[in-house]
Amino acid sequence: MTSQTGPLPIALSCGEPAGIGPELAEKAWDQLRTDCVFFWIGDPAHLPGQVPHVRIAHPAEAASAAEKGLPVYPLSFKGPRTPGTPQAAQAKSVIAAIETAVSLVKSGQAGALCTLPIHKQALAEGAGFAYPGHTEFLAHLAGVDEVVMMLASDQLRVVPVTIHIALSDVPAALTPALLEDRIRITHSALQDQFGIAEPRLAVAGLNPHAGEGGRMGHEDASVIAPVLDKLRAQGLQIAGPLPADTMFHARARAGYDVALCMYHDQALIPIKTLDFDRGVNVTLGMPFIRTSPDHGTAFDIAGTGHANPTSTIEALKLAARLGG
């Protein structure tokens, strides 16, 4: 067996071949080379060929391969890459790439997982993919029931307590049990993965001015505040519920390590405004590190060479830092 020296490489699953994933993999290697060693799992025939690639049979070969080209852990796909047009026949192989990456990380052959974007409709049509999204499938493979989505950059970390639901559905979905679960998973991940011994959490209110004493909604006082009081009594450093409109200026951000927000846009608007290209999706609550770029397949520019690799590069670098 090939022996591993140095840090374990990052496994990068290919995502949807018809999207910008193959271009991002090549551009990421071209900028990182051996500074952050990763290997791409996919069909070598799908790569644009703008940089050299080196096939590897074992992740331990990635470091030496990265000196010469993009390390590729090859999987066979049906048919060529068709930028902008997903092929149903390739769906099972897209799923296999994710499963292979998880297996290599769980077995200790890779240090962390970074995933390129998938297209859920293509997977559902081609392979009966029944999971709501990439993260839920990874949680299934990891054997965990609850995970948390964090968006992270050098300027801000945010966690949306509720995610892809209509704004009108948020108040009913925002239960004390859900909020407490999200806070505990986030707190533990900041300690265990980010190395923050005493995490400082800031929790946004749901309503304008955090309800303003009940004049703008009752959820802040009746749902959020009791959970925060309970956790503060157990020793967690938590501020809130806070008015969301004053949480994200520079002086406020200096006072916490993560902001927990009550709904999708409350969390994602500030981080995408502050650091649009460098935001990274981190999945908390799994037994291994998983990051991904904070964007989709971008079918409209696939194959044009215009894909921006910054978020993928940041996702790889963060995976390496957390997985080291």
Image: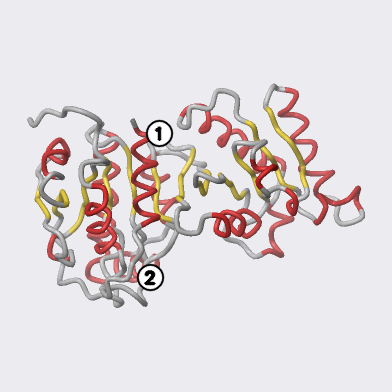
- Mark 2, other Cα within 10 Å: few <14 / some 14–19 / many ≥20: some
Q: Residue at x 23, y 67 (%)?
A: 90
Where is residue 158? Give x, y as percent.
58, 47
Q: Residue furthest front?
A: 251
- Quadrant into which the N terminus falls: top left
Q: Given this view, does label 1 or label 2 mark the residue nearer the observer?
A: 2
Residue type at tag 2: Ala
Where is residue 313? Give x, y as percent.
34, 51
Q: Residue at x 42, y 44 (%)?
A: 139
Residue ID for mark 1: 287
| 301 vs 61: above or below | below
- Of residue 281 and residue 175, the one placed in the foreground of this image is 281
Q: Earlier in the sequence, mark 1 or mark 2?
A: 1
Circle on res. 89: none
Residue ID for mark 2: 298
Q: Residue at x 64, y 44 (%)?
A: 260
